[in-house]
Image (cartoon, rainbow, N blue to C red):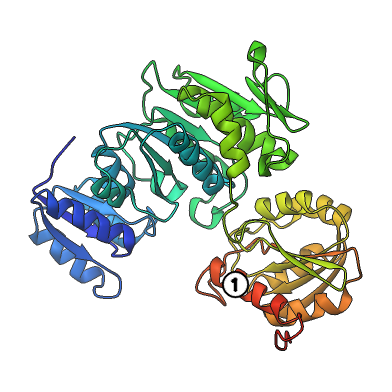
């Protein structure tokens, strides 16, 4: 564990503040730069006149950001806040990345470990910086990290005892550029080398590609999926693992074929790698409460169901939601686009969606891509989309908010977007106000 005497922090959101707190607790002199208080000339001046041993980077700064380029030009090592926090953890680590399903997976993993009597906490992209977790819980048995591709861009020595890549689907290509770069960035969760005891969990259909991405370096690979050639595979609500039999997830959130074949199978493999009894895994699944704004049933009005999936900020997540919600769906989609190719979900739209109500900056591009598949209506705002979908829906149909886009063009967060959808539904109920 490397200690620093001087450090520069780029960005002062929650992760930047947590890094500063940790470094100052260790006696380091810390300088902070934010885009609200400084420009590139001030940054260059500070870099030329300061003696910084490390630069701790907020995940909001892309590698090609001018400040990042200036730091590299000054010869100062870049380090993710995630890795700084992890390096101070004395126990074991589970790390999970993927395009979709990370938060649900780490929540279930953490609850499994806690139910088994172990000291475990969640950190990372889940919303609680790793530096904050290790400061407040210095004696953890397990640190459970949700890891984004943005955080992985600047890791150096990071490694986990159990590392999981759930899936790689089109996402964040406005930052990473290509799927190959995005996939290789995700693969950094497996570290530059693997110790003999480390478990590297991957979808069975990605194994050969990931091996190539990591230059064929040997690791303890464990595969999961929905086919019997995976080490852990999901079928009919159960996860199977060779001669060890099956784990029955029936009656839980993870019995869904969409969630079960990815998160279900992967987390069962994680629990085995951590030495947790199967009965604990099943009990934790039965107790599991879904996270807000993730495929949550809001209610029914006049025979029409309403589902809030505001967390779906990419089209792969929207496709998964459509699979889970059955057929005859009225889809509300759009927002701030994160990808340019809207065509890859056209087949499932044709199969399951009656009509689409579009909002935000992506509205025109989505209309052009999908209007030949099913009825599309450009609505502008969530309120208009909700009202238009409500008026078009028949009993037995489902209105699904699953935007496939970020929220920041019209909302502060996907949470605010989802809460607005719920408020609009409540306005339908007697005494609930005017939903229009």
Task: Give how far across and how far down residue 108 sits, in percent.
Answer: 53, 41
Q: In the figure, is residue 105 to the left or right of 375?
A: left
Tell me, yes or no, if residue 209 can be seen here: no
Looking at the rendered image, the quarter that the C terminus falls into is bottom right
Q: Quadrant of residue 8?
A: bottom left
Q: Residue at x 63, y 58 (%)?
A: 312
Task: Give how far across and how far down residue 425 sits, in percent.
Answer: 72, 75
Q: Quadrant of residue 114?
A: top left
Task: Give how far across and how far down residue 309 sits, in percent.
Answer: 66, 60
Q: Which residue is mark 1?
A: 419
* Dot 1: element: helix
Q: Name above or below for residue 194 compared with residue 156.
A: above
Q: Residue at x 56, y 31 (%)?
A: 281
Tell me, yes or no, if residue 258 can be seen here: yes
Q: Residue at x 70, y 84 (%)?
A: 432
Q: In the figure, is residue 227 to the left or right of 96?
A: right
């Amino acid at each position: 564990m490397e200690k620093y005497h001087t450090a520069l922090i780029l960005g002062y959101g929650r992760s930047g503040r947590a890094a500063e707190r940790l470094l100052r607790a260790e006696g380091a002199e810390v300088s902070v730069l934010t885009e609200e208080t400084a420009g590139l000339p001030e940054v260059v001046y500070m870099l030329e006149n300061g003696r910084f041993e490390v630069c701790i980077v907020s995940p909001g700064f892309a590698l090609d950001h001018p400040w990042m380029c200036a730091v590299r030009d000054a010869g100062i090592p870049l380090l993710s806040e995630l890795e700084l926090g992890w390096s101070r953890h004395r126990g074991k680590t589970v790390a999970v990345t993927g395009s979709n399903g990370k938060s649900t997976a780490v929540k279930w993993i953490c609850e499994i470990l806690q139910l088994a009597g172990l000291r475990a906490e969640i950190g990372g992209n889940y919303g609680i910086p790793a530096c904050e977790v290790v400061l407040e819980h210095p004696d953890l048995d397990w640190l459970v990290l949700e890891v984004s591709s943005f955080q992985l861009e600047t890791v150096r020595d990071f490694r986990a005892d159990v590392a999981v890549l759930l899936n790689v689907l089109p996402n964040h290509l406005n930052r990473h550029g290509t799927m190959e770069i995005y996939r290789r960035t995700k693969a950094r969760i497996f570290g530059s080398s693997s110790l003999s005891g480390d478990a590297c969990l991957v979808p069975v259909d990605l194994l050969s590609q990931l091996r190539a991405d990591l230059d064929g370096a040997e690791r303890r690979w464990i595969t999961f999926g929905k086919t019997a050639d995976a080490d852990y595979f999901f079928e009919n609500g159960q996860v199977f693992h060779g001669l060890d039999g099956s784990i029955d997830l029936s009656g839980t959130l993870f019995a869904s074929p969409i969630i079960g074949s990815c998160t279900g199978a992967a987390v069962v493999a994680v629990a085995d790698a951590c030495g947790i009894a199967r009965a604990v895994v099943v009990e934790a699944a039965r107790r599991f409460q879904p996270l807000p704004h993730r495929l949550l049933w809001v209610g029914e009005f006049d025979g029409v169901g309403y589902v809030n999936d505001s967390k779906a900020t990419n089209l792969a997540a929207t496709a998964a939601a459509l699979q889970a919600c059955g057929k005859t769906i009225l889809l509300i989609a759009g927002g701030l686009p994160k990808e340019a190719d809207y065509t890859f979900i056209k087949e499932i739209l044709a199969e399951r969606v009656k009509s689409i109500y579009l909002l935000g900056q992506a509205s025109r591009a989505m209309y052009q891509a999908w209007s030949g598949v099913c009825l599309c209506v450009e609505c502008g705002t969530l309120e208009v989309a909700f009202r238009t979908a409500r008026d078009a829906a028949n009993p037995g149909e489902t209105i699904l908010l699953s935007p496939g886009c970020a929220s920041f063009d019209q909302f502060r967060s996907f949470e605010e977007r989802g809460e607005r959808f719920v408020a609009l539904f409540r306005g339908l109920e007697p005494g609930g106000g005017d939903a229009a």
